[in-house]
Amino acid sequence: QKEVEQDPGPLSVPEGAIVSLNCTYSNSAFQYFMWYRQYSRKGPELLMYTYSSGNKEDGRFTAQVDKSSKYISLFIRDSQPSDSATYLCAMSNAGNNRKLIWGLGTSLAVNP
Amino acid sequence: DGGITQSPKYLFRKEGQNVTLSCEQNLNHDAMYWYRQDPGQGLRLIYYSQIVNDFQKGDIAEGYSVSREKKESFPLTVTSAQKNPTAFYLCASSIDGLQGYNEQFFGPGTRLTVL
C-alpha cells in the first residue's frame, strides 16, 4: 500500500462546477499538507499548504485536512477551463520536512 | 524575476552517453532537489542537497550523480548506468528552515529522451 493514495481520474466537470479532489494517507505522523497544480509539460506550482487539521481558503480554493480520517481535500469553486490540469497532493512529517511524499495526481478537465 | 531555471527544455541522448541537466535558482534557497516524473508513477526523488558541498540520495539515485558547488546551482548527471533514463526531470528548491513548512518550488522541467 502506498503511503499516499490519490485517484488519478480523469475527472471531467462543466465550467462553474465545484470540484472536490482528495488524498488519503497512512502515516499518522504527517503534519504538513500541500496541493500543487501541474499543467501539461510544466513544473508543478504550489497552490495551497496547511498544517495539521483544519481548513484554509484562498480565493476559489479551499484546502481541508482531517487527520482523524487521514484524508485531505482540495475544493475548487466556480471552476474555469484554465483550472484544467493535474493536481498533486504532497505531505511530510515534522521530523523530516524536507522529504515530501507525493500522490500520483488527479487529472482534471473543466469543459466550457 | 526570482525563480528556478532548467536547461535544456528538451534533451536527446544516445545510449551509453552521459548527459548533464542544469538547474539554477536565484531565490536564495538553501535546499535543492531533483525529481523524476514518469506517467503513472508520480514524482520520485533522485537526490537532494541541504547545503553547498553536501547532498543525499533520494529513493532512486542509482545511475545518477549530482554536485553542489554553489548555492545557486545543482546540476544532475544522468549516467550510462541508468537503465531507463527517458523521463521528465524536475528541479526544485526550498528555504529549508529547521521547522515548519518546507514548500518546494519547481522549475519548468527537462524532458530527456534516449534514442
Image (cartoon, coloured by chain):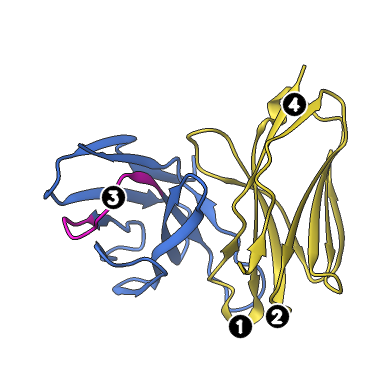
Chain colours: A yellow, B blue
Q: Quadrant of the C terminus of chain A?
A: top right
Q: Quadrant of residue B98?
A: bottom right
Same chain letter for marks 1 and 2: yes
- The answer to whether residue B81 shows anywhere in this view is yes
Span of residues in magenta: B78-89
Residue tagged 2: A29
**Residue B37: percent from the left, percent from the top?**
45, 49
Q: CA distance from mark 4 to mark 1?
A: 38 Å
**Residue A108: percent from the left, percent from the top?**
69, 35
Residue tagged 1: A95
Q: CA distance from mark 1 to mark 2?
A: 9 Å
Q: Quadrant of the N terminus of chain A?
A: bottom right
Q: CA distance from mark 4 to mark 2?
A: 34 Å
Q: CA distance from mark 3 to mark 2?
A: 33 Å
Q: Which mark is residue A110?
A: 4
Please state which amino acid type lies under the numbered disc 3.
Pro
Q: Nearer the viewer, mark 3 or mark 2?
A: 3
**SS at badge 1:** helix
Please state which amino acid type lies under the numbered disc 2.
Ala
Task: Report the residue at 79% width, 69% height from top.
Answer: A70
Please state which amino acid type lies under the numbered disc 1.
Gly
Please state which amino acid type lies under the numbered disc 4.
Val
Q: Nearer the viewer, mark 4 or mark 1?
A: 4
Lower position in the chain sequence, tag 1 or tag 2: 2
Q: Nearer the viewer, mark 1 or mark 2?
A: 2
Lower position in the chain sequence, tag 4 or tag 1: 1
